[in-house]
Amino acid sequence: MDLNPVLSQDTNYQIELFENKLSLYQKQDKHHVFVDFNSKQLNFRSQAHINAELVNKAVLGKKKQATTIMDCTAGFGKDSYLMSLTGSQIIAYESNPLMYALLKDGLNRANIDTISLRKKDALKEVKNTDCEVIYIDPMYPTNKKSAKNNKHMMFLQAFVGHQAEMAEQLFTQALLSKAKKIVIKRPVKAAYVLAKKPTSQIVGKAARFDIYAK
């Protein structure tokens, strides 16, 4: 996969192998961006009661039974990983070549077989999914000051950016699918997508999960 055309979007980043991980080195602030499912943070969360994770409460519901989930916006894969720890099978979509490469490397190193990663645009696939749950976590605007303190967010701003209509477009197509449930992650005070009131909600300090039962 030739990543040079994508890297040219921001010449402050370069591809490196860092501690045996495929990474992007940010020259100005001198930090590495990579995917690591063995990080202390994720290890702590995975060792806790996994069904207490808000994303899992949203996708599994009260029955807490493992299911099949289409993650339309995989990104760094944290939500896919947390959902997979419930025994659910995840089909994760990531169309950005750089993000896909980092995520694929992280999955390979962690030897995770419950997440199937696909380098495709979920918008073209979501209507025809066979998964029981569709999960949508669109990137929303972040101010530069807060992003500067988060190296992952800096990377996403540089190479992915906020796509204003993504949530609406994915939700519209998801409503046409045979999935039993659609879950959309939103900022706590954000408006409902398509102004459609959810069936229920799981609300945390930084984000909420709008749940649409079909």
Image (spheres, rainbow, N blue to C red):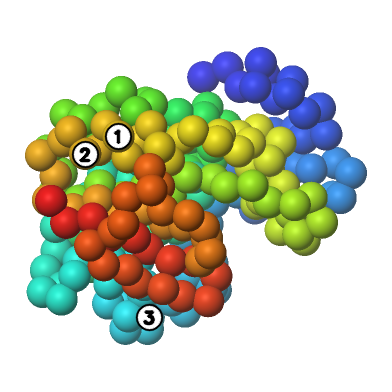
Q: Quadrant of residue 23?
A: top right
Q: Amino acid at mark 3?
A: Gln
Binning the other alpha carbons within 10 Å of mark 2 as few (below 14), some (14 to 19) or many (20 upward) gives: some
Q: Left or right of 175: which side holds 100?
A: right
Q: Nearer the viewer, residue 80 or 187?
A: 187
The alpha-carbon separation of the residues under discs 2 and 3 comes to 34 Å
Give the farthest residue toward the right. 28
Horizontal and vertical percent position of residue 167:
43, 40
Q: Residue 31, can we see it? A: no
Residue carrying label 3: 47
Q: Which residue is mark 1?
A: 172
Report, in whole angstroms, how far the alpha carbon at label 1 lies from the one at label 2: 5 Å
Alpha carbon separation for disc pair 1 and 3? 36 Å
Q: Earlier in the sequence, mark 2 or mark 3?
A: 3
On the image, the x and y values in percent for residue 13 come to 77, 35
- What residue appears at the point 19 percent right and 70 percent down from the top-left corner? 61
Camera-nearest residue between 14 and 55: 55
Indicate which disc residue 190 carries.
Answer: none
Disc number placed over residue 175 in the picture, else none: 2
Label 1 or label 3, whichever lies nearer to me, is 1
